[in-house]
Amino acid sequence: LTFTFLWLMDWAWHYLASGNASNVSELICLVIGTIFLYRFSRSYRVALALGLMYRVLKFLERAPKIWDSDWWCIQIDTLLAFALVTHVNLDQAATCIRTMFAFFYFAAGFWKINASFFDPATSCSSVFFLQLYAAYLQPFVKFSSVKLIAMAAPTITLILELWVGIMMMIHIIFPHRGRKI
């Protein structure tokens, strides 16, 4: 219930801050719906499902101009909302969601196997790693290792994403082996 309330209030704040007059009716419905949910909802499962489906609708409102990861979020949120409303065993839903995340991470790593991603001049991973270096490591490292970090970042990213996906799949196939991720 708290998640739903905070999510709806976040969207209400977003519309207030945008200054877009065409969103006034949606904002009013949002605030009334939030107050109604917070005051009269007896089931956290229904409230959470409504919050998840609201987020799905907001993603779909922007479609097709959304990221691939947004499509994964839509699928996972829809599955969880369905499980909450139909009173499916949440352990079964969690296993299904873990499987989806395993495929997501593995696919994210697999689709990075191309020449463009391994080129530090065009890879987003080089930029992200260098930002982390500048923010957290630069004061402690005595030598300049920017070029080394930029060159290693794509490989490290690929290995980590493939590893997380594979480890999650191993745990799903052999549930009594290893740790849950």
Image (cartoon, rainbow, N blue to C red):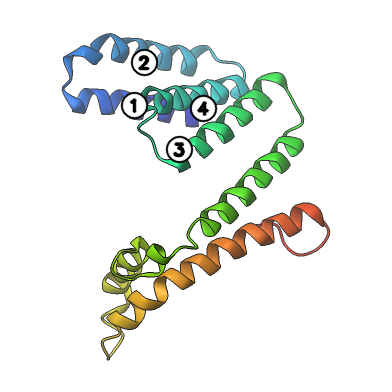
Give the labeled residue for mark 3.
70
Front: mark 2 or 4: 4
- Disc marking residue 21: none
Provide the secondary structure element on which disc 4 rests: helix
Give the labeled residue for mark 1.
11
Q: Residue at x 36, y 77 (%)?
A: 151
**Residue 55 as seen in the image, left or right of residue 173:** left
Q: Which residue is drawn at 52% across and 12% down?
A: 40
**In the picture shown, does residue 125 fall above or below 61?**
below
Q: Looking at the picture, tell me which residue is in the foreground, 175 or 66.
A: 66
Provide the secondary structure element on which disc 2 rests: helix
Front: mark 3 or 1: 3
Cα separation, mark 2 vs mark 1, equals 8 Å
Cα separation, mark 3 vs mark 2, equals 22 Å
Dot placed on the residue nearer the N-terminal end, 2 or 4:
2
Task: Identify which amino acid the numbered label 4 is placed on.
Answer: Leu
Give the labeled residue for mark 2.
30
Q: Do the residues labelled 4 and 1 touch (CB within 8 Å)?
A: no
Give the labeled residue for mark 4.
52
Dot placed on the residue nearer the N-terminal end, 3 or 1:
1
